[in-house]
């Protein structure tokens, strides 16, 4: 088999929300299709994926550098020599030819879209959901299991924020979610505490409410928030400081008697190694949120899990950022601790297809071949236009 074409299209995110650092009004995502010469029912078999959510499309990086490298590579260099089928790791290696070490960022997101599309393709070739393909590649027995899930929302919106927050969280509970995450750091501490009080009162427990500062705080502000948050016994306090300030993370971990979460904005195994070495991560409680769609794809993400294992951090503490179908299959395939979901924001990518069951705080993937992105009503039109 061989790749005959790789296509990319920029898709805008819908909605008007903001966290403490970023307004998402103009954010976009790269949707990528890897098309092969294998024919099924008279049409080529393809794989499709995207570069997660919360950054921007990487059209230039993909079209000018990475896609040409993959298409120019000899076909046999992209195939697993034992199976004769496309090997995502070999495709990734070709996409990154002549790139220098370090400098992770948009390059990591662009490469991830291609690499993850290869996993969707492998699932379709095997006529199985991606979680089964991923599990088998990881030496695990494929199992369709319900995974813990939380609804990520609580973004800052114009107008009556508390009333909107109340309605939003109530809607999540009615939909089957039992835990939520809301934003902090975009208002004063007192105003953010009022939002937390509201969330806790609706959900019923601080243990079911996480808060996310998106790296907003310096050391002093992070410490002030941590002191105020301790009595709530929250699910976790996410990215209180800059994600690469491992010293500040370690200081907070030593002082805060609660769970910290971080890792969403680490894009390489080297970054994760430094977090584990210098960031004060407590293996018995803290949560790591690296996202394959932001960090070169599943190949690099599995290397990050190996580093966690070496540091004594169980996979149950891996809860990837990015509440979408791709990470749902990654969580199921690799046996991770749980899923994020974007049920109300970041369309057309956020959330799951309608046939993924949300029940009593868990989510069970559907059994469409690959990631099942075509089954997501909001996204299916963009995919049809890309591959049609």
Image (spheres, rainbow, N blue to C red):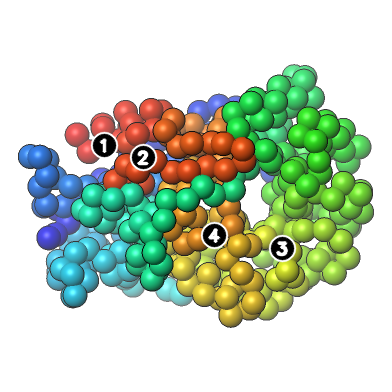
Which is more N-terminal, label 4 or label 3?
3
Is residue 233 at all visible to an observer of this figure?
Answer: yes
Give the position of the N terminus as an image quadrant.
bottom left
Q: Which mark is residue 373?
A: 2
Report the residue at 19% width, 64% height from top. 85
Report the residue at 42% width, 51% height from top. 144
Pick out the residue farthest to the left.
42
Q: Secondary structure at mark 1?
A: helix
Q: Secondary structure at mark 4?
A: loop
Write down the residue under mark 1.
386
Decide: few, some or many residues near mark 3? Use Cα within 10 Å; few <14, some 14-19, many ≥20. many
For discs 1 and 2, the disc positioned in front in the rendered view? 2
Q: Secondary structure at mark 3?
A: loop
Is there CB contact under 8 Å for labels 3 and 2? no
Pinpoint residue 64: horizontal percent, then vertical percent.
30, 54
For discs 3 and 4, the disc positioned in front in the rendered view? 4
Pinpoint residue 7: horizontal percent, then vertical percent.
25, 45
Q: Secondary structure at mark 2?
A: helix
Write down the residue under mark 3.
286
Q: Is residue 126 left or right of residue 317?
A: left
Decide: few, some or many residues near mark 4? Use Cα within 10 Å; few <14, some 14-19, many ≥20. many
Which is more N-terminal, label 2 or label 1?
2
Pinpoint residue 196: horizontal percent, then vertical percent.
82, 37
Residue sitting nearer the eye, 257 or 101? 257
């Amino acid at each position: 088999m061989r790749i005959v074409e790789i296509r990319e299209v920029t898709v805008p995110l819908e909605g008007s929300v903001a966290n403490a650092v970023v307004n998402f009004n103009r954010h976009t995502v790269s949707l990528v299709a890897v098309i092969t010469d294998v024919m099924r029912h008279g049409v080529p078999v393809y794989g499709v994926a995207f570069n997660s959510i919360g950054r921007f499309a990487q059209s230039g990086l993909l079209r000018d550098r990475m896609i040409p490298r993959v298409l120019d590579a000899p076909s046999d260099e992209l195939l697993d020599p034992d199976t004769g089928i496309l090997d995502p790791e070999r495709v990734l290696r070709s996409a990154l030819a002549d790139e220098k070490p370090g400098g992770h960022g948009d390059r990591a997101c662009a490469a991830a879209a291609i690499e993850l599309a290869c996993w969707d393709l492998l699932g379709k070739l095997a006529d199985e959901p991606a979680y089964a393909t991923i599990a088998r590649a990881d030496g695990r027995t494929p199992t369709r299991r319900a995974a813990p899930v939380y609804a990520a929302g609580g973004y800052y919106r114009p107008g009556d924020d508390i009333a909107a927050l109340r309605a939003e969280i109530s809607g999540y509970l009615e939909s089957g979610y039992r835990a939520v995450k809301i934003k902090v750091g975009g208002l004063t501490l007192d105003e953010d505490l009022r939002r937390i009080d509201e969330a806790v009162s609706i959900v019923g427990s601080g243990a079911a409410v996480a808060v996310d500062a998106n790296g907003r705080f310096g050391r002093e502000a992070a410490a002030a928030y941590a002191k105020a948050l301790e009595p709530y016994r929250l699910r976790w306090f996410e990215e209180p400081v800059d994600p690469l300030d491992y010293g500040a993370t370690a200081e907070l971990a030593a002082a805060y008697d609660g769970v910290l979460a971080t890792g969403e904005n680490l894009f390489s195994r080297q970054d994760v190694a430094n977090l584990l070495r210098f960031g004060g991560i407590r293996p018995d409680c803290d949560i790591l949120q690296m996202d394959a769609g932001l960090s070169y794809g599943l190949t690099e993400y599995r290397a990050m899990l190996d580093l966690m294992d070496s540091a004594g951090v169980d996979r149950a503490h891996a809860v990837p950022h990015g509440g979408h179908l791709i990470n749902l299959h990654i969580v199921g395939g690799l046996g991770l601790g749980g899923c994020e979901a974007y049920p109300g924001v970041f369309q057309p990518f956020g959330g799951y297809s309608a046939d993924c069951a949300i029940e009593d705080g868990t989510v069970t993937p559907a059994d469409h071949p690959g990631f099942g992105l075509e089954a997501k009503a909001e996204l299916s039109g963009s995919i049809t236009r890309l591959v049609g």
